[in-house]
Amino acid sequence: MRAEPRVLFLISVMGHGRGGHFYSLRTTAEALASEFPCMIAMLGRHESPVVGASSVPTCVVRTTGLNLPTALGGLQDLIREWKPTVLHAFDVSSHGLARLAGARAGVPVVTTKAGGPNPKRFFPLADDIVLFSSENMEFFSSHPKFRGVRLHHIANRAVEIEDDADRIAAIRQDLVPARPTLMRIARFNPHYRESIVQAVNLTKRLNADGAACQLVLVGTPQIPEVHREIVALRDEHIHIYSDDRFTVEASRLLGVADFVVATGRSIMEASSKGRVLLTPLAGGSIPALVTTGNFPEFFATNFSPRNRLPDYDEESNYARVRELVRGDTAGVEELKRQSREWFERHFSIRAAIPTYRAIYQGAMERGRGGAHPLDALIHVAMSVRQFASAEQ
């Protein structure tokens, strides 16, 4: 019988610690912890409130970049005490330290690239890389540098989201009862600005056309200039919630919405609630309705803000959304049913547990791979620079 894994997850915390990959790590670790021991180490100056609230044991290894020997020593102490059989890093910076500590302790390292565009420059080697999107999988599979790397395509996963009744009730006090409600949960920063603006554009256009609806925007004002810009676009149909009461575990507010504009794991969380899904398109003015016809294209990019669709007709898309908002009940119910089916088939973390177990057991049986000293040197130097330049 193959030995069961004992997995120490690592993630770097460079700022507020509330990005999507923190939720992805937490979801993955909590699901796997029901099967075998797991722990999460946060590397950086801060603790992520998302990871810190996990049911999985967590700790912080203070890492500033300039204290590399001390941080590495702290990580090695943790490895000696907790005795993991696998280290699993969830970003490039934490992978740099995991690479050093794993080499010294003789513990294999797995790393995850949690979506995003294909790397244009340096991306470090690893024995096993988990990739969330088929776009990334195609890139890494065809790149000569990664020819000897074991690549694993596991789409980003989520658990079924439980509503937070108190916070939902607080938001509903500001809304018109029974009026169709759109929602976008995203940090206010340049990366998500376009998707937020598209949600605003859609809401304003629908109301101007007599399709009464309202939009709820929830997100941390990470870049104040972007937050101010969106606030300036607000009208009586748009409601913005940016304080910690609403932005921490904001997915538990999805019960407010009928239609959800989302990217990445937010799509998967909305799908768990059986909501009608829309996702932004690069260069578009409004988000696109997710249907059985375009789902494969969006799924391939992990529902990225970089989405593009061949032969897309924005006016036809808008007309269909307007019909749904105006009262096509049968159409809304069919899209909700399909949304929930996508969650069960593609997004539920429970279905990925056997794959993760097999990856860890394979890594344990093979042990540490090649050192790749030049690649490791570049990688560690990059990690040190990133930790050193992080928010104080």
Image: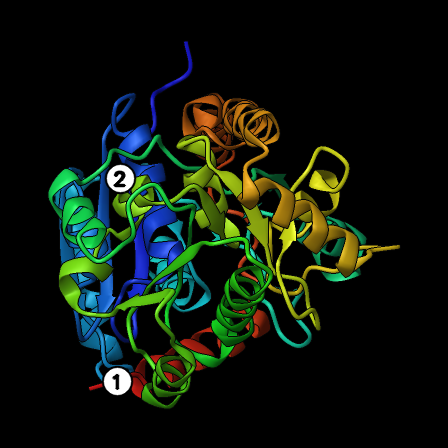
Q: Is residue 1 left or right of residue 36?
A: right
Q: Is residue 371 above or below residue 278?
A: below
Residue holding disc 1: 391
* In the image, residue 213 above or below residue 374: above
Single out the mark in the foreground, 1 or 2. 1
Give the camera-side residue of 136 and 20. Answer: 20
Real-space Cα separation, disc 1 to disc 2, in angstroms: 30 Å
Q: How is the image coloured?
A: rainbow
The residue labelled by disc 2 is 84
Which numbered circle lies on residue 55? none
Decide: is 253 above or below 208.
above
- Visible residue check, residue 158: yes
Residue placed farthest to the top in the image? 1
The N terminus - image quarter: top left
Q: Position of residue 3 (x, y in %)?
A: 36, 19
* 253 versus 21 height, above or below: above
The kind of residue tagged 2 is Pro
The disc, 1 or 2, on the residue closer to the chain's N-terminal end is 2
Q: In which quarter of the image is the C terminus?
A: bottom left
The image shows residue 98 at horizontal and vertical percentages of 36, 58
